Amino acid sequence: MFKLFKNPCFWYTLTWCFYYCQGVLYPSDSIISKSIALLILLLSLIYTYRYLSSNVIKGYAKALFCVLLLISIYGLFAYATDGVVIRGRASDTKSFMWFRNLYLSILPVFTYLYFAKSNYLTVQFIRKVFPIVLIAVLISYYWSYQTAIGLAYLKTGNNVEDVTNNAGYIVLSMIPMLLVFDNKKLIQYVGLLVLAALVLLSMKRGAILICCIVSVVFVLRALTHSSKKSKLFILLLIIALFIILYLFVIDYMAENDYFMSRLEATREGKSSGRDDIYKTLWNHFLNDSSLVRTLFGGGVWYTTKVTWTAAHNDWLEFLLDMGLIGIGIYACYWISFYKLARNKTLPETSRFCVLLIFITLFIKTFFSMSLDSMTFMQSMMLGLSYYGIINTSVDL
């Protein structure tokens, strides 16, 4: 335990966990939460600099750095042209939020790459901090639920219990961490069941869709790579757990009108107004006569100047904000990400971990903002996998 306290990766991770506890341990959006966010940002900048200055980056890390450089240049240009506030069609946004959102999402990847390269981040480390991370995520999930209830009350004037919980994506991001328990199948699949149930309860349709895909991939991998002796045990365990989940869902659906309304909306193709947003932004791009904007975009959050909100789609956001140049760099990033998941020089478990994170984040790009919402859990597992530290035959 004393060695853990001397590990800078532990304190960095603990700071993130404490940040996730806002709203319960201390007021949300208060001076405390803002100070913690600033501390995380400063630490991330320091460790990112250490990593980039002491390593020759290539592949995925190089592609991510190019994206980081791109959004930094556009952020600085926004300050020079729009000032501290970007005037939108429906509302204004502080320019600082561009850096805050994207830096707190991207920089932790480089930070955990540094920790993995320096042997501070290991499989044993993640096993030790897993309970702490889980508690922090559950607190964040609870507070997000309470906040959604409060917003629903302000909007309708009625007390409600069933709302959409955006923290479903945070819970979803914990699934790759279960790979550190690859030799403890009971823990691994009970954990998968609990996380899947929480994602389901969040009523977040995108998170539920991705969770279903990731869970199927997770199970197929277990059956493919297990021995004949353990295959039967894993199969029976999976069947038992999914029967429990199925019975829970059936019972939940029967008594939950909100859940049924969300399901019916999905069947009818309703997308919470996204179709209108996508159509407006795409038509604007096609009809824009400015060659400069076509190539370089309209600048930070240009989408909010065209329609009433951001794109809720990374590809459209990059296309409108940073033009064909920006979307080209973004596409190269995803190609490098996929190549990392297929890199045969990495152990199978590491490649599979990258694949899970790739699936989660890539699918999310089409109906939400993915690049600015990577969690520190995903960054941690990417750092661990990038250097092939997750290796079933060695570490587990």
Image: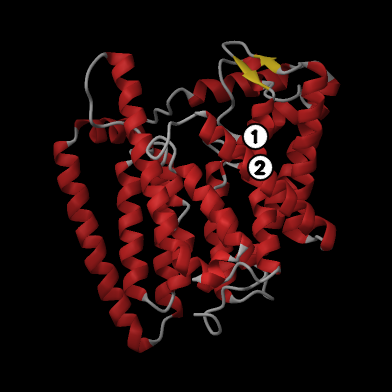
Question: Which residue is at a point 56% across and 84% down the rendered structure image?
Answer: 394
Residue nearer the viewer, 286 or 216: 216
Label 1 Cα crowd, 10 Å radius (few <14 / some 14-19 / many 20+): some
* For discs 2 and 1, the disc positioned in front in the rendered view: 2
Q: Which residue is mark 2?
A: 41
Question: Which residue ends up furthest to the bottom in the rendered image?
Answer: 229
Residue 113 at x, y percent in the picture? 68, 61
Whichever of callouts 2 and 1 sits on the residue coming sooner in the sequence is 2
Amino acid at circle 2: Leu
Dot 2: what SS?
Answer: helix
| Labels 2 and 1 touching (C-beta < 8 A) | yes
Residue 104 in view here: no
* Vertical placement of residue 64 versus 302, above or below: below
Label 2 Cα crowd, 10 Å radius (few <14 / some 14-19 / many 20+): some
Q: Which residue is mark 1?
A: 100
The answer for how far apart the CA atoms under marks 2 and 1 are is 8 Å
Question: Which residue is at a point 63% across and 22% down the rendered structure image?
Answer: 281
Residue 303 at x, y percent in the picture? 65, 21
Q: Would you identify the image quadrant in which residue 193 lies?
A: bottom left
* Vertical placement of residue 333 versus 267, above or below: below
